[in-house]
Structures are given as structure tokens and as C-alpha cells.
Image (cartoon, coloured by chain):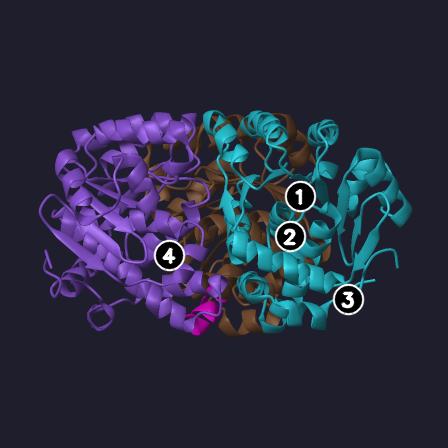
Chain colours: A purple, B brown, C cyan
Amino acid sequence: MHGPANELPIIAADILARLRTQSPRVHCITNSVAQALTANVLLAVGAVPSMTIAPEEIDGFVKRAGALLVNLGTFDAGRGSATEIALAAAQSANLPWVLDPVFIDRSEPRAAYAKTLLTRKPTAIRLNRNEFFELAGAGADEDALAKFARKHGTVVGLTGATDLVADGTRLIAIANGHPLMSKVTALGCAESALVAACLAVERDAWRASAAALLAMGVAGEIAAKRARGPGSFAIEILDALYSLDRDALVAHAKVS
Amino acid sequence: MHGPANELPIIAADILARLRTQSPRVHCITNSVAQALTANVLLAVGAVPSMTIAPEEIDGFVKRAGALLVNLGTFDAGRGSATEIALAAAQSANLPWVLDPVFIDRSEPRAAYAKTLLTRKPTAIRLNRNEFFELAGAGADEDALAKFARKHGTVVGLTGATDLVADGTRLIAIANGHPLMSKVTALGCAESALVAACLAVERDAWRASAAALLAMGVAGEIAAKRARGPGSFAIEILDALYSLDRDALVAHAKVS
Amino acid sequence: MHGPANELPIIAADILARLRTQSPRVHCITNSVAQALTANVLLAVGAVPSMTIAPEEIDGFVKRAGALLVNLGTFDAGRGSATEIALAAAQSANLPWVLDPVFIDRSEPRAAYAKTLLTRKPTAIRLNRNEFFELAGAGADEDALAKFARKHGTVVGLTGATDLVADGTRLIAIANGHPLMSKVTALGCAESALVAACLAVERDAWRASAAALLAMGVAGEIAAKRARGPGSFAIEILDALYSLDRDALVAHAKVS
């Protein structure tokens, strides 16, 4: 155990409470498939989404936001320009930002672009095993995660059957979640937006990332109990996130 | 009381009945986050959505539609060109059109563009308090609404805890709705599309706007009783709109 | 009866089982309104969606996919270029592809483009009566369907109150489905993606198309029993597709 496993549910409950009180806005450059679910996940936890990628608007939207998400799904020229402007705005406003290098294992140009974004110092990265391998050139074992996080000065949130969250020195494993989560499009994308929302109210990026992944995993388990398939699951997970509290987090957390 | 408060539920039921019978098509230039929900709200009330913004297609789509919606969310160059063509087509076909200046309080270029659209004489405008302030330079009291509506020859549908609908001479307050409505992305955008649908079957734009806002508010209350959170609420409001009838409108309406 | 009506439920169950085992990826060039539902339908049956239209990425995405969908909704310049690259990639990789000429009856430029796509030999086409008339210049009777399929070397899946699936020699009628299916946006678009998924695991394009239309129709009937309106129906049909099995297909199929 490398991190405060017992404390994480309490930390996550506290961060969720801050989201509901402070209602930070999260600006999301994300793929068109994921936009509506991402917005609804943010609203369910008390945050506020904005999603424009229009060049003349994005600077103003990002500068006044609490955090920025850059998701590389359905990435095109418009999203590329928007990302450049958004990252400059985030840097000048000292805003935390999350990189979700979705499907870079399936597209060489996208992988190459993701690697250039690493030099822009994402506050946190949320990805799966294949995407990590593509980005880091290494398997997703604990040492590789820590080394990668240290090298790039970031926090890695790796999701899968067990989620791992690593910065250079701390690592935590979260064994929550449910297989139905992979049967709803863009739930991983929305989870990255939740990481960004948590970063808007919690400066410790490792805590913020772990809290987001725990919250989504526990909500997924609660939703799975009520769902009959992926359609109802997608609805139930929004309801579960909306009412997720300390008791549910403590009762469900499988953290080590 | 400035309008036919007692009559509005009956008027709304009549307009909804016409939507189901006539199935008008509403062409929507709207943001990518809102497209699916907007289409589903239109289908739920019996209207038919179309959403292309391709320059070579939009003239044909708009000219044969029953009404046009221009929503400024995720506004970019493509949507800008589409809007110009669509407004010309709407004008030549004498089509009613609705302006939804979404988030203009967060983006100066978008606010400037919304102001130019005012000169194109929207049949109705649907917005919230902050957006009205940005557009009108005045707080959303009854006098300011009436003055603005008169000046621009339009109907203002202002949504919030209590909705207000004003033309130059008539004003009605609708105290329906539920806080969960603000936890579902794009429900306001979809409500503007519902105003457009009502305009397609009702020439009195003030009646059409008030009917749409009442229908959405009552559907929201019915949905909230059945929902456990924003996920199920979004589903329930579509079901509620689908079966909304005169009895439900009369029973729930809080109009003055 | 021109086809193996009694066998279709068994064939469809077998194809669905292969989808769940093989998890083929289906690359979808589809309209922005339909993307999320299309992805969720594919995931519900065990397939994997991808949706990028970025010019530098689409060749790689298509070549490694199991099938391609080209849907002409919200068709713009970006989707046009993407389609050209995608079709070249599909041809070089000998990939099956499905054409969904959505709303070509409402847009002359789109109809003209659909006709040029016919010369690119779609493996299957999924459309409704009005779209078929626009594409074929003939009413959708059985002879016209067979003649069209023969002429263009394709399979036609015509959906409506009764679905018809024709290649040059075989024809089957499927009388499943429910009126609520027309009250959910993009369900027809998603059905075309399901045809593409079936093509990825079944070389006989007529069987694949008929299986997809039967599966969607039966799922629609199951969903309608549980739904209270179009909102819950959209959720229930995903759940029904997820657990659709041989018994349900045999019990519900109305095939002749």
C-alpha cells in the first residue's frame, strides 16, 4: 500500500461536496460522441460544462473556467487549433488540465500528437492500458506508471478492471467499477472530465484523480445493481453520481 | 395579471394536439451537445427534426420546414454560414424563427453576433436572465421585457425559477418546472426548439412561446416525481412530453 | 415466401453470438445527431464503434475495422472527404460497407451524392420507402427491390411497418418493430450500423442484413412492452439488444 487507502473515500466525499458547493466550470475539448454524456456527468456532480471549440471564443471560455479537458477523440483540424489556444489560455491562467489520449493505440497521427501534448505538462492524464503503452512505450506495471508520472511531472490515472493512480511517489489501486461501464460509449471520456472537475476544487492532483476514479467506480457498482443492460446502466450511473455520498463511498470502496 | 392565465393550459393543449396532427418539421441549427436531445424532444411532441448545416443543403431544408431554430451554442464558422443561408431562406419562405442566444454572457464574440441577429427579427427569443441582461443591457423585470419585445418586434420567453413570456403588450408568468431541469445538459436548448415547433402551428408567437414553456415546465414536474436523479429525469421528461394532455396541463399549471 | 423465413431467427441468433464473441470494430461515418446512440447500439450487441472523420486518421481506422458505415445525415465537406478516403481504404482492405442515404428525399445534393456512391458498390443499403424512391426512381414493391439489388450488386434493407430485405434472388419480409421506433432520433441510423456489424461476422450480406433488421425489430417489441414513452423506449431497446437471445428471436419473429 503506497497511499492513504483508508482515507480515500473520505477525501473523495469531501471533493464531491466541494464540487456541489463551488460548481466549477470545466471547459471540455472533447469528441462529438462524448459531448452530451460528458456534460451530463459534470452536471450530475454539480459542475458546469462548456464545450465550444470556436477559435474566437475558446480563450475567453478557458480563462474563466476552473479546469480544462483535452480529449483526442474524433480529433480534427478544428479541435487541434482549439487545443492550442486552450492550452495557452490554461497556462496563462494557471489552470489545471487533463489529457485523455483516447484510442491513440489505434491511430499513429493521434499518438504522435498526444506525445507532443506531454511536453505541455498535463496536470493529470486518464487512459487505459493500451493507450498507456502507446504513450509510454512500457507496460502498465506500478514502476512504469511511477516513472512515467515522475518524468512528465504529471499524475497518471489508469483505468481498467483495477484502476491505478500514480504520481512520482504515491500509488493507489481502486478495484471498483463494473463490466457494463465498457458497454456505454464515452463513459471513459466522461470520467476524464470528472478528473478535471475534481482538479478544479483540489490542488493535489493525485488526490483529485483518485477521488474521481473512485467516485465513478462506486457509482458504476451502484448503477449495475439497478440496471438491466447498458441502456439503463447509463441512466443509473448519472443518478448514482448525483446522490453519491460519504456513506456509499466508504461502504463500496475497494482501495489498496 | 396581463395575459389569459386561465386559458393558457387549454391553449397549450390545443397547440400540442396540432403538433401531433400536423407533425411540422423544425430545422435546427444547434450545438453538437444539444442535437440528440433536441431531436428527441421534437419527436416526443410529434414534430420532426432536421439538423444539417451543410451550405448546399440548408436552403432546401429550411424552405420546406415549418419553423427554424438558431441556437448559438458551440458556434463556429460553419454554423455561422449556415445561419446566414437559413435566415435568408426563412425570410423568403416567411417562416417563423427562434433565437436561442445560449451563453452569450460568457462570450463577447457570441454576444456581438446575437445582437446582429436581433436586426433579423426573430419571431421569438428564448433565454435566461444572464443572457437577457447581456442582450438587452437591462435586468429582466417585466417592464424591461415588454420594452425589449416592443423595440425588436419579437416575443421574449425568459426561463428561470419562474418563466416570463412577453410581447410588447402581453405578459404571463409560469411558475412550473423543477430544479433537476438545470442538471440535464441542453434541456434549455431543446425548450427553444419546442418554441419553434409551436410557432409552426400557431401564428400568435406569444401564445406559442407561452404554450411551449408551460408544456416543458409541467413535463418537468411530472418527470421529477418519477426520477431518482438527472439521468432518469432526462428520460422521464421525454415520456412526460409524449403523453402530456389537457388534464395534466390544467392540473399542474401555475400561471399568473 | 422467397427466403428461409423459418431459419432467420436461428441465423440471427448465431450472428449475434458471433458479434459477442468476435467484437468486430465498425467504423462509422455518421451524422452528429446519431453518433452516441449508434455507438451505444454497437456496444450493446458486442461490437466496438469508432467514429473519427479526421482525414489523416480515417485510413488507418477503416483498414483495421471489420466493416464501414457511411451515413449521409448532416453531410458536409468534412464528411465528404472522409467518405472518399474511407471507401478507398475499405476497397483496398476488401471490407464490407453499408450505405444509409438518410433523408435524400429531402435534399437534392445529398440524393445526387448517394447516387454516385451506388457506383462504389455498397455491400448493403439500409433505407426507408421515400429514400428508396429517391434512389431508385421506383416504388418499393418486391420486384423493384430485387431489380435494384441485382442492378447494383447490393442488398437492400428497406425498413418500415414491414421490413423487406432483398438481394437479386432472395427476399424476406419482417413484420416486427413498433411505432415508438420512429419517435427516437437516429434509431434507423443505428440500425444501419447494426447491419454493418453483422456484415463484419457474416459474409452473406443478405443474411447479415436480415438478421440485423430482425434483431432490431424484436428488440423494439420487447422494449415497447416495458416503455412508457420514447424516452424510456430508447433505454429499453439498448437493454433488449444487449440480452437478445435465440428464444426471444424465435418467439417474436414475424417473418415471411
Instruction: Please give left or right for residue C149 compared with residue A9 in the image.
Output: right
Chain of the residue displaying label 2: B
**Residue occupying image coordinates x 43% and y 49%:** A36
Using the numbered discs, state the Cα–Cα distance from disc 2 to disc 1 in whole angstroms.
Answer: 10 Å
* Residue identified by numbered label 1: B66
Specify which label sits upstream in the sequence, 4 or 1: 1
Q: Position of residue A41 (x, y in %)?
A: 35, 54
Using the numbered discs, state the Cα–Cα distance from disc 3 to disc 1 in whole angstroms.
Answer: 37 Å
Residues at marks 2 and 1 on the same chain: yes
Q: From the viewer's perspective, is residue B35 above or below residue B245?
A: above
Residues at marks 4 and 3 on the same chain: no
Q: From the viewer's perspective, is residue A39 above or below residue A177?
A: above
Residue C254: mark in rendering = 3
Chain of the residue displaying label 3: C
* Residue identified by numbered label 4: B182
Element under disc 1: loop
Instruction: Please give left or right for residue B227 compared with residue B59 in the image.
Output: left
* Neighbourhood count class around disc 2 (C-alpha, 10 Å): few under 14, some 14–19, many 20 upward: many
Chain of the residue displaying label 4: B
Can residue B175 be seen in this snapshot? Answer: no
Element under disc 3: loop
| Magenta extent | B217-228
User: Pointer 2 and pointer 1: residues touching (CB < 8 Å)?
Assistant: yes
Residues at marks 4 and 1 on the same chain: yes
**Residue occupying image coordinates x 45% and y 40%:** A32
Mark 3: amino acid? Lys
* Neighbourhood count class around disc 4 (C-alpha, 10 Å): few under 14, some 14–19, many 20 upward: some
Q: Quadrant location of residue C162? A: bottom right
Q: Position of residue B82 (x, y in %)?
A: 55, 29
Element under disc 2: loop
Query: Which of the two residues, A240 or A216, is positioned nearer the viewer here?
Result: A216
* Residue identified by numbered label 2: B47
